[in-house]
Image: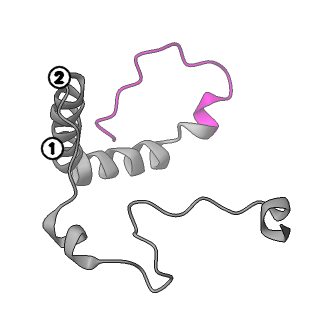
């Protein structure tokens, strides 16, 4: 039996979606990824707070050193598309 508990009324037909095998699958995903998800959410929260405090993200040195793409554009700031009317003038 799964260690997932549904804390809501189970309406008729829900058991076809929330089957034991489905709950076991969700439990396995949770067990496998919950630590990583918690860490990522922590990083996300700290970044959001930093942005709210006025500190904006910076590119990592690896991205700064990568230079332009083969198309001559920076991966951080792609050139806007040219409209057909502007291109024909």
If the image is split into quadrants, where does the C terminus sit? bottom right
What is the spatial separation of the Cα atoms under label 1 and label 2, in whole angstroms?
A: 21 Å
Left or right of 11? Residue 68 is: left
Q: Is residue 6 magenta?
A: yes
Residue at 30% across / 77% down in the picture?
67
In this rendering, position of residue 67 left or right of residue 39: right
- From the viewer's side, name the closer residue of 43 and 52: 52
In this rendering, is residue 86 above or below 28?
below
x then y, percent, for residue 40: 21, 45
**Where, by quadrant of the figure, is residue 45 drawn?**
top left
Q: Residues within 10 Å of mark 1 (few under 14, many from 20)?
A: few
Q: Which residue is mark 1?
A: 39
Chief secondary structure of the magenta portion: loop
Identity of the residue drawn at 53% across and 36% down:
18
**Boundaries of the magenta span:** 1-16
- Disc 1 element: helix
Q: Mark 1 near mark 2, Cβ–Cβ under 8 Å?
A: no
Locate residue 19, reporting x and y percent. 53, 41
Q: How is the image coloured?
A: one colour
Q: Which residue is mark 2?
A: 53
Residue 66: numbered disc: none
Left or right of 42 on screen, residue 15: right
Query: Does the magenta-highlighted stretch encompass residue 17?
Result: no
Please state which of the two labelled residues, at mark 1 or mark 2, is closer to the viewer: 2
Q: Which residue is at the front of the view, 26 or 85?
A: 85
Earlier in the chain: of badge 1 and badge 2, it is 1
Residue 37 locus on image (x, y percent): 24, 45
| Rendered residue at 16%/30% (across/down) | 50
Which residue is farthest bottom? Answer: 70
Q: Residue at x 16, y 36 (%)?
A: 42
**Mark 2, other Cα within 10 Å: few <14 / some 14–19 / many ≥20:** few
* Element at label 2: loop
């Amino acid at each position: 039996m799964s260690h997932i508990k549904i804390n809501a009324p189970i309406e008729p037909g829900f058991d076809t979606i929330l089957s034991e095998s489905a709950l076991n699958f969700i439990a396995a995903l949770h067990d496998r990824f919950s630590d990583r998800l918690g860490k990522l959410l922590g990083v996300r929260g700290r970044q959001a707070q930093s942005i709210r405090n006025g500190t904006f993200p910076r590119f990592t040195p690896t991205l700064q050193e990568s230079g332009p793409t083969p198309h001559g554009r920076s991966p951080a700031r792609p050139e806007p598309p040219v409209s057909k009317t502007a291109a024909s003038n």
